[in-house]
Image (cartoon, grey):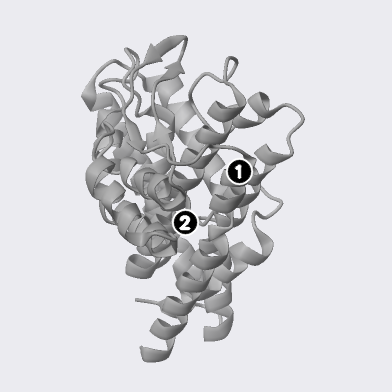
Amino acid sequence: MSFELALLAYLFDNKFGEFPCKHPVMLMGDFIAAFEKRYYSDHLLSGTVLVVSLLTVTLLSSLALVHLCELLPNWMATIALALLASTGLAMNMLHSCVAAILTAAYPQQAISHLVSRDTEQMTKIDIYKAALETWAENLSDGVIAPLFYLLLLGLPGIAVYKAINTLDSMIAYKTPRYFYFGKTAAILDDIANYIPARLTALLIVLLAKDKRYAWQCVLRDGDKLESPNAGLPIAAMAGALGIALGGDARYHGQLKAKPTLGVALNVINPATLTEALAMRTGIDRIVFSLLIAGALLT
């Protein structure tokens, strides 16, 4: 495990956020869109070929970048690799995007950029609830999971994870078009996020005022969603804040019944979202402490 690399990457993401260039995830998205446009068919095989193709290209590209960086002096190679790896972390961007809901002139439009559900008929409570769910779930997908694979497998690990996550966000839907085409991507994403989602839920519980209650919510409600992973950090967040998340939502004009996670002990309002976003300080302290300890001990 390269704790120094992960520490620098997390520091760069916290300090600088996204760099002013085309993001690697956008390049992955272009690849997926181009493949789908030319080779789409309503079969499992077609989607599997897309998954294998993108992961192969991503792995080979990241290995090539590692090789090029290794030609530099050690300290320069570490910095270069950390800068590259930081593009796979999204704490800075995630926090700022969710926080923007609090000051947005048109909250429904702002939340539409963060969720896949219909937003036109959302109430203010619905908007804050969706923002809270986005914050909780993407702490796993955008921060803990990529950091986990960066620690385990270096730059190729975080790059391949981001490819899996991008595939999931673009084609892993249970719609007539993507049910078979996106099935391989969906299964792979569930596997890749299994451990990180549970680590994220634990992290949120550790930051809760009533840790026992937050943990009870995870155990009781964490497996209620269709995804084996998404419900865990959301249930932890619901328990930590004493609120109810989840519930029915509209997708593509259709009302979808979804279970409720947590119990509505408190109301959901801007202060609730502010409190949830304030967890970033605690998360950063824990992550930095663990990475520093790991770097000193290895």
Quadrant for residue 173, please give it. top left
> Dot 2: what SS?
helix
Q: Amino acid at mark 1?
A: Val
Q: Residue furthest top?
A: 253
Viewer-closest of 114 and 178: 114
Judge whether 80 appears above or below 264 on screen: below
Question: Where in the figure is residue 214, as x and y percent of width and height?
Answer: 35, 53
Decide: few, some or many residues near mark 2? Use Cα within 10 Å; few <14, some 14-19, many ≥20.
many
Res 265 visible = yes
- The quarter of the picture where the C terminus appears is bottom left
**Which mark is on residue 137?**
none
- The quarter of the picture where the N terminus appears is bottom left
Quadrant for residue 50, please give it. top left
The earlier-in-sequence mark between 1 and 2 is 1
Q: Residue at x 32, y 37 (%)?
A: 51
Judge whether 72 appears above or below 150 on screen: below
Question: Where in the figure is residue 144, as x and y percent of width and height?
Answer: 41, 58
Question: Where in the figure is residue 201, as x and y percent of width and height?
Answer: 35, 54
Q: Amino acid at mark 2?
A: Val
> Dot 1: what SS?
helix
Q: Which residue lies under the disc numbered 1?
A: 98
Viewer-closest of 171 and 246: 246
User: Which mark is in front, 1 or 2?
Assistant: 1
Q: Which residue lies under the disc numbered 2?
A: 143
Query: Relative to 232, is 3 on the left or the right?
Result: right
Q: Residue at x 60, y 43 (%)?
A: 98
> Label 1, label 2: how many angstroms apart (C-alpha)?
14 Å
Q: Residue at x 39, y 64 (%)?
A: 206
Res 196 visible = no
Viewer-closest of 158 and 50: 158
Q: Residue furthest bottom?
A: 297
Q: Residue at x 47, y 82 (%)?
A: 292
